[in-house]
Image (cartoon, rainbow, N blue to C red):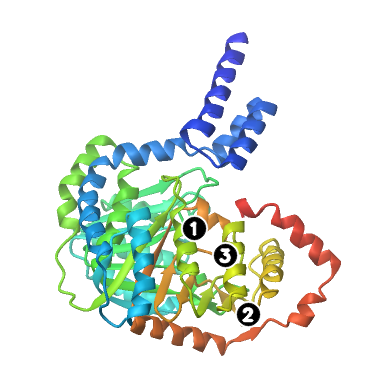
Amino acid sequence: MLLIAFILLLLNLFFMISVVFIEYKKPEEAILWVFILMVFPVVGMVIYLVLGNTINYKLSYWRKNKKLKVVYAEYVRKQVLYARNLSKSGNFSEAEFAETASVIRFNLNYSESLLMQKNDVEIFCWGQDKYAAMFADMRQAQKSIHIEYYAIDADKVGKELAAILTERAKAGVDVKVIIDGFGCLMTPASLFRPLREAGGVVKKTRPFGSHFRNHRKIVVIDGEIGYTGGMNIGKDFISEHKIKTPWRDTHMRVVGDGVYALQYIFLTDWIAMCRKKVIELELEKAPSYFPAHQVTNTLYCQYITGGIDSDKDAIKLSYLRMLTSAKNSILMQTPYIIPDNSILDALKVIAASGVEIKIMIAGIIPSVYLNPVTNYYIEQLVKYGVKIYKYNGYLHSKTMLIDDVLTCIGSVNFDTRSLEINDEVCAFFYDKQFAEKNTAIFAEDLQHCQELDYEAFAKRSWRARVAEKFFRIFTPIM
């Protein structure tokens, strides 16, 4: 009994040391975990392992991706020199490109995000269109299909995907699938059994569910075609949810340099879950995953990733840099609004400085706890002139437009979880014509929105206000 108590004491001490010196958590978070571990030694360790522990993920990414990152670092060094010398080009005016170049430099220097130049991008606003194009591309795959999704439902859409992947695996195509343990908690293993039997490999990250989730949506086909954005796999995304319909979302098909970025992100996550012998084989095959392309269209973009493998908060800070670059307007689409204090303060400053900010959110309530918290932050923002629009349906899109020049599309919800905790990916595009297309999409969506009735909103009940303040306490884990 004394031996068990001593071992538990050592483990508890190790976790406290890890929180402060290894995981390097933020002061307020570190204090909370140390307090929990001290006051509730045994129960606290269990809670910490489920909700707080990141050391195993960080060590895995660092140890297993060293060789891959060495190759990537060579490109980064060359790009730093290029970005330092950006000058007027393409469709930008002198003043516009000067401000946008600073965002490019920040993302490169802080997040080591390469500036991709040659790209063709197709935008999908509806799940039917995305699935039709993506499944057609998958059926034509000859070498590899790499997939990373937060959620793949075992419904008709998920079954069609699994059937296509199984058929391609039987044909000798290298099929790799990453799914999130929490997002696919209810997805039965039987969905992927035929794929595994055909030679495909399916890995579940954080298989027992976790506070830390892989929220990315990435597909790379033959190293030549990429898909990313806000849509997972399921019939909800073709507006067949019982309540959340119509379901409006944003996804994109990428050809060109951007596919290299998506492939690199996927391989980084894949290798972190592989054994040493498998990693060596993957590194040998790496050149075949990045084939030459024939795209000549110039469309500057950068891909930003965030997650627990890094202490940088790259997504949040890239959003801050993007927002604070705005001079005239910010157009945003997000299911709900739950920013952290730094983002909230930035929006207040920007709005109070005269920048027009329009935020479009879901008209259908996302959940019983997300809705009151969103209302809390809406009240904080409308005081400074921010305009809120509620879409007549369920808006799941995650996009942002800055000054009709910079466009951001990805998997990032406008909440603390996406900005700081989850593994996410988003793309920054620096092009006026591309921004104009997305501004037109936003304008079309406005035709299906109701602007918030501010007088009625201000008169909501005291019970609603109490709920807002209560649920706001839990925003870091929502």
In the rendered structure, the answer to whether residue 303 lies left or right of residue 450 reads: left
In this rendering, position of residue 434 left or right of residue 234: left
Tell me where residue 64 sits by quadrant. top left
Examine the rendered structure and indicate whether residue 47 appears above or below residue 248.
above
> Is there any visible trace of residue 413 in the rendered image?
yes
Disc 3: CA contacts within 10 A as few (<14), some (14-19) or many (>=20): some
Q: Position of residue 147 (x, y in %)?
A: 34, 59
Element type at marker 1?
helix
Q: Amino acid at mark 1?
A: Lys
Viewer-nearest residue: 79 or 158: 79
Of labels 1 and 3, earlier in sequence is 1
Mark 1 touching mark 3, by CB under 8 A?
no
- Disc 1 versus disc 3: nearer the observer: 3
Q: Amino acid at mark 2?
A: Lys
* Viewer-side label of 2, 3: 3
Give the residue displayed 41% in from the left and 48% down from the top. Answer: 204
Three-letter amino acid code at disc 3? Ala
Cα–Cα gap, marks 1 and 2: 22 Å
Residue 358 image point, x, y percent: 57, 79
Q: On the image, numbered disc 1 is attached to which residue?
A: 316
Report whether 31 appears left or right of 305: right
Question: 380 or 279, which lies in front?
Answer: 380
Please tell me the numbered disc located at residue 346. 3
Using a 10 Å C-alpha cutoff, classify the residue at mark 2 as few (fewer than 14 neighbours), some (14 to 19) or many (20 or more).
some
Determine which quarter of the picture holds residue 273.
top left
